[in-house]
Image (spheres, coloured by chain):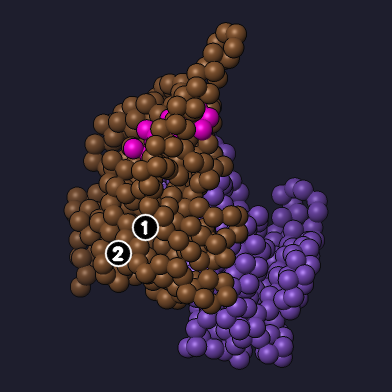
Amino acid sequence: MKEVEILKINELLEKYPFVESYFEENKLDISGYENKTFIEFLDHFTLEEVEDMALDLNKNLIDLQEYIRQMKSFLGIEVSNSVDVLTILPGQDKLGNPEGFERLDIKKSEMIAIVGPTGSGKSRLLADIEWTAQNDTPTKRTILINDQYPDKKWRFSSNNKLVAQLSQNMNFVMDLSVKEFLELHARSRMVEDIEETVEKILEEANKLAGEKFRIDTQITALSGGQSRALMIADTAILSSSPIVLIDEIENAGIDRKKALDLLISSDKIVLIATHDPNLALLADKRIVINNGAIINIINTSVNEKNKLIELEDMDRKIQELRRALRYGESL
Amino acid sequence: MNLIVFSGPPSSGKTSVILKTIEALKGQDIKVGVVKFDCLYTDDDILYEKAGIPVRKGLSGALCPDHFFVSNIEEVVKWGIDNKLDLLITESAGLCNRCSPYIKEIKGVCVIDNLSGINTPKKIGPMLKAADIVVITKGDIVSQAEREVFSSKVNSVNPTAITMHVNGLTGQGTYELSTLLMDEEKEIDSVKGMKLRFPMPSALCSYCLGETRIGEQFQMGNVRKMDLEDR
């Protein structure tokens, strides 16, 4: 007999506190049945109740077992989840010609820029990584994780995605305060010290945002810059995904360099699709994509790094003028 | 022929996901047709036609769309076979959040979107809970945190399903979805004798039969009263 069939509900809850959210999300009110097994609890529903609540008792039992199995492996992922090196092996372009590189290794805390015209295949590259392609996507690329053929879990696990994405036009749609929102996310990630984590995210987000915000601000009332700052800090600290993909971050209201530093310092691999020289030159390498294929991988040269210093200088001047304008000074 | 049943609340992106997935399937030389079920109106069939996909639509009118689905699925499958399809996709109306037109031996896909709110997985019945694959759409417009919270909620009501994120506009994820649909072992030539995964809601009252007058004396059959007592 399986554990879920033998243990009483309160024993289950004690051993696996997370089953409470299974009961909660499935609207299974177990009060009064703590001393019974889950099967005995399911047996108490009358035929009418089963029909009324659209219950499938058999599946509930299978689901609870599966849920416990997944959550156990989710809680044990810290070790197995770590991606030290991500490898891309070449495939082909849209016409079937081989790609222009032999092997690309990206290490933890590395940042890579992706450049190429619209429609050149940037999203496909990211999709290949997310799906851990094994010569089975249109590009015929192969992705290795820690130098090995990846576990299928990366494809199908819903709590354990390889790639977190930050895109240009993302919004918050929930109507919650910053505190409630971060707590909700932390709970879904099964974080132990929720309060500390929430405060850490707020602190980091405020370091990135031009204008500071408070923990009781509604997330829907945040400015564009503040929202981006919160999303980045939250992804850096709370997301379980070891790879972060950024699709252009706008300059307005956020310190982009600090934002990238924060992600990199959280042991993430950062891929950023951008045509902004300020960002592209921050990366050590950039992948050039055209016609569906990686046609070149360029290491940022010393000359380019010097250009970056120049660019940052210009950027600071523009920022300063912007600040002056905002506070009513004459230019 | 393979049959796949797509279901999901209105405006969740079923049609966009199906269209983009078929594009990926065509690249693999698979002939796909679609039958769209709806209640009063749909012009989704025009979108399929424009994409060169064989399509039929069925409007249930005065009937419950899912009841209408079951009583027509046999003929729909015959249409697919007569048209020599490799894969037939049915798209449901997905109106009341309870029903699921899923059939036991046939793959069922539920499409649900990130914008619908985090309590939605809790509100949807067998349509979500009995699906084999859950496709979550509109992820590109919400934050990473919301995507993670939403998919963990979906997972807790249907842990055995494969949960995927698909962007119906760019098609990101549809190639991957397309690889999960075809299954040689699931070849069928009829659905006769197969069973629904979950019974449809039963209701037969005077209003089902066309009664329009309001009042207790006009209510017959399956009638239930709300509890409005003080508490």
Work out whether disc 1 and disc 2 sit on a shared chain: yes
Q: Indicate yes or no whether the magenta region holds residue A72.
A: no
Badge 1 vs badge 2, beta-carbon distance below 8 Å: yes
Task: Write the residue at 53% across / 45% down.
Answer: A275
How far is mark 1 from mark 2, CA to CA?
Answer: 10 Å
Magenta range: A251-261
Relative to the observer, which residue lies in front, A109 or B29? Answer: A109
Quarter of image, res A147: bottom left
Mark 1 = which residue?
A162
Q: Eyeballing the image, is A93 above or below A186?
A: below
- Amino acid type assigned to the residue bearing label 1 in the image: Leu
Give the purple chain's letter.
B
Q: Colour of chain A?
A: brown
* Labels 1 and 2: the sequence-earlier one: 2
Q: Residue at x 56, y 42 (%)?
A: A169
**Regarding mark 2 in the picture, which secondary structure is present there?**
strand
Task: Name the disc covering residue B149, or none.
Answer: none
Between B170 and B202, the one nearer to me in the picture: B170
Report crowding for label 2: few under 14, some 14 to 19, many 20 or more residues within 10 A (C-alpha).
some
Find residue B4 and report its image quarter: bottom right
Q: Which residue is mark 2?
A: A145
Query: Mark 1, residues whose alpha carbon is within 10 Å: few (<14), some, or many (≥20)?
Result: many
Foreground residue, B162 or B200?
Answer: B162
Amino acid type assigned to the residue bearing label 2 in the image: Ile
Would you say residue B220 is visible in this rendering? yes
Kindly identify the residue that appears in the image at 71 percent across and 49 percent down.
B216
Question: Closer to us: mark 1 or mark 2?
Answer: 2
Residue shown at 54% from the left, 18% from the top: A321
> What x and y, as percent, mark residue A225?
50, 30
A23 to the left or right of B231: left
Q: Nearer the viewer, residue A63 or B5?
A: B5
Instruction: Find residue A324 and report its horizontal and vertical position in percent.
Output: 54, 13
